[in-house]
Image (cartoon, rainbow, N blue to C red):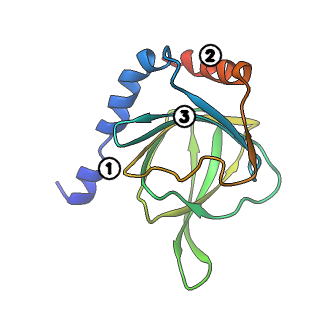
Amino acid sequence: MTGLEQRVKPEILNDAKAELPTLLGTGQWYGAKIFAIPEVHRVYRPWRNGFIFLHRIYESRKRSSFHRHHGNMWVDVKEGEYEMHLARESDKMPTAYASMSVKAGDWYFMGQRDWHRIQPKTRETRSVVIVQDWVPPTILNVNGEWMTTRELQEHLDIFRAYF
C-alpha cells in the first residue's frame, strides 16, 4: 500500500460517521451562514485534532472562486450533486487541472495543498466534512453571520435523519 493510499483510506470518515448519532445529540455544535458563492450553511464542532462540519450548499448560477482548506479533508456527500474543479497554485492564480461530478453516496479526500471550487447542480447539497490537522482562525473569516438557535437545531435535525 502506498503512502497516498494510506492517507486517503476512509477510516477517519467512517469513525466520525459512527460517532455522529451520539454527537448529534450533544449541545456542542456551532452554526454559521457564509454568504459566498455558493452560499454555505455550516454547522460544526471540534472532533479529534480537527472539526466535523455539516454543510448545506445552495445552488448558484454565478461561478464560484477557487479556495483551499488548510487541513486534510474527507467529504461524504449525503444529498445533491455538484461539479468540483481542482487546481494547483501557480504564481498568482490557481490553475485548474481536473473536474469531476460528485453526487449523493460519493466520498472523496482532498489534501491540504489542493485548491477547489464547486458548482452545485441541484438546489441544495448536503455533506459531512471532516477536516484534520487544522484549526481555523475564525469560521466567519468571510462575509457571514452566526445561525440562530432555531436555525442550528433545524440544520442538526436534517442531518440526524441520515444517521
Q: Determine the CA span between mark 3 and mark 1.
A: 22 Å
* In this rendering, the label closer to the viewer, 2 or 3: 3
Query: What kind of element bears circle 1?
Result: helix
As drawn, 40 above or below 15: below
| Residue underneath mark 3 | 44
Pointer 2 or 3: first along the chain: 3
Query: What kind of element bears circle 3?
Result: strand
| Residue underneath mark 1 | 8
Amino acid under label 2? Asp
State the image quarter where residue 79 is shown. top right
- Give the camera-side residue of 138 and 41: 138
Pointer 3 or 1: first along the chain: 1
Q: Residue furthest left?
A: 1
Q: Determine the CA span between mark 2 and mark 1.
A: 29 Å
| Residue underneath mark 2 | 157
Where is residue 94 drawn, in percent x and y? 59, 74
Q: Residue furthest right?
A: 61
Amino acid under label 1? Val
Where is residue 90 drawn, in percent x and y? 54, 81
Q: Residues within 10 Å of mark 2 (few under 14, many from 20)?
A: few
Query: What kind of element bears circle 2?
Result: helix
Q: Quadrant of the N terminus?
A: bottom left
Residue at 44 percent of width and 66 percent of height: 113
As drawn, 157 above or below 57: above
Amino acid under label 3? Tyr
Residue at 45 percent of width and 40 percent of height: 51
Where is residue 55 drawn, in percent x and y? 60, 36
Q: Residues within 10 Å of mark 1 (few under 14, many from 20)?
A: some
